[in-house]
Every structure is written in C-alpha cells, then in structure tokens.
Image (spheres, rainbow, N blue to C red):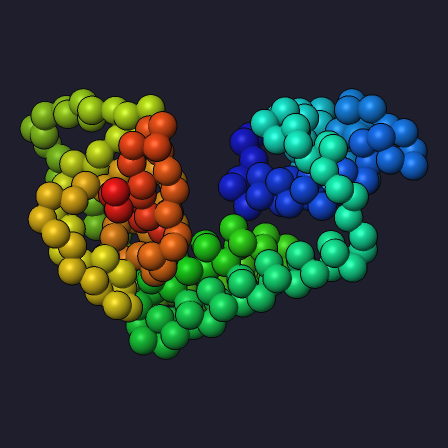
Amino acid sequence: MSMTRPELVTIAQTCADWAPNNYGGPLTLDREQTVRHIADGLLDGLTQKYGRPAVWEAVAAYLDAHPHLLTAPRTTQAERDKRQAERDAYADRYLKAAYHHYTAAEPYEALALIDRAELTSPTFKDYEQFRTATRKMTPPFIPADLTGTALRRRVTLPLAAPIPGPPVMYHGSDTRDWVYPGRTVIEGDWPAAIPEHCTATDSDTQTLAGGLIVVCTGCGLDCT
C-alpha cells in the first residue's frame, strides 16, 4: 500500500521542522538514528498504518533528497508553532473558497480546493468530511462507450505528458481567464482534473522538463 500525497507532505513538513534538531543535536544522533527518531517519535499514526520499516524508508528517502535539512539551523517550539499556524491559515483560506463553490453548487471546484487545503496542512482538519458532503452534489458518473476506440500512445516528457483532449476553453472556475488556443495540459496528479475546474493563482506554478516548461500546479496547464 502506497502512502498518499498528504501523508508524504506530512513527512516532509515533519522532517523540515525536526531534522535539524535531531541530527547532531543534544542527543548526538547520526543520520540513521535521526530517521528512526522522527519516524517513531513524530509519525506514530503513519507507523501504525504502514509499519515502522515503511515509514523509516519514507523518512530516509526524503532526507536523502533534502540533505540540507540535517544541517539547517535548529528550530524552536515557537518557530515550529508559527510554521504550523501559517500552514493552517493557508489551508483555511482554501476551505473557505471551497465552501463558496459548495454553496454555488459547484462541487468539482470545491473538491479541488479541499485537495489543495489538505496538501497545504494535512493535519489541520478532517478533510474527508468535507469531501463526503461535497460528493453528494456531484452527478452520477456515466461511463462512455469506448467500443472500437483505437489506442493512443502519449508523447512523454521527463516528468509529464500532454493529455489528448479538446482545447482548453478557459482557466480558473472563478476568474475564467481566457486561454490562447494551442496551450497544452501536462499530465500529472493535479488537484483539478481540467483547467476549467482549476482555482490556483498565477503564482502556483511548477517547473518541469529541466526548466523548459512551467505548469500550473492546480491543473497542469502549460504556463510557459
């Protein structure tokens, strides 16, 4: 069983908050001991769900990818509290925006914002209760008849691939910014399934393909 994106975010945030204090700190922990101290002492919920070895491996992998955390300046409790408060406040703004779409009977937009809130601060709320209420508004899914449809191989990029489909009509469920014809959508595990359901801001972007492509992290729209 693979860990979810919010669970991986929890590991990342925990490592950023605590790794500098554990590695070479008052307890003089080495790297392996730091991994186990974080996993066993700070991620108990995940260890109960996935087992200690799996969480050790996930923590170790994150620290391998971000080795600077081991030697970063130590954090105080006040600093960690401030970081968490900022994460919670950001997630709360997403949830309030989601509620706006919920009351407007726009469930897809609401669900996208709930996902973004959880990825910002996974421990802030029980997000599933919001999803459950919102899903009750979604129409039943009617599968398309794909009989006789030919298979299509997507042209891949290092971390992404264009999604075949109709042209994007607009970007953003709220502002509905016009999108110039020809803009592509990059495949990925984005919060919004299509740009028309996206609620990300202009600053919510990510660089892919060695810096050649800039995409919206809300939906994967090519913003290069």
Instruction: Depth check: give the residue in front, 88 or 83.
Output: 83
Q: Position of residue 161 (x, y in %)?
A: 26, 30
Determine the image quadrant of residue 40. top right
**Which residue shows up at 58% across the image and 39% down it?**
8
Determine the image quadrant of residue 56. top right
Q: Position of residue 94 (x, y in %)?
A: 47, 64
**Which residue shows up at 65% across the image and 28% down it?**
67
Instruction: Depth check: give the residue in front, 166 or 26.
Output: 26
Left or right for 123, reference 109: right
In the rendered view, tell whether residue 143 sits above or below residue 175: above
Residue 105 shows in the view: yes
**Which residue shows up at 29% across the image and 32% down it?**
212
In the rendered view, tell whether residue 132 sits above or below residue 4: below
Q: Quadrant of the C terminus?
A: top left
Instruction: Depth check: give the residue in front, 120 or 107.
Output: 120
Q: Position of residue 126 (x, y in %)?
A: 59, 60
Q: Quadrant of the N terminus?
A: top right
Left or right for 14, reference 176: right
Residue 54 shows in the view: no
Question: Number of callouts in the render?
Answer: 0
In the rendered view, tell whether residue 76 sits above or below residue 172: above
Determine the image quadrant of residue 159. top left
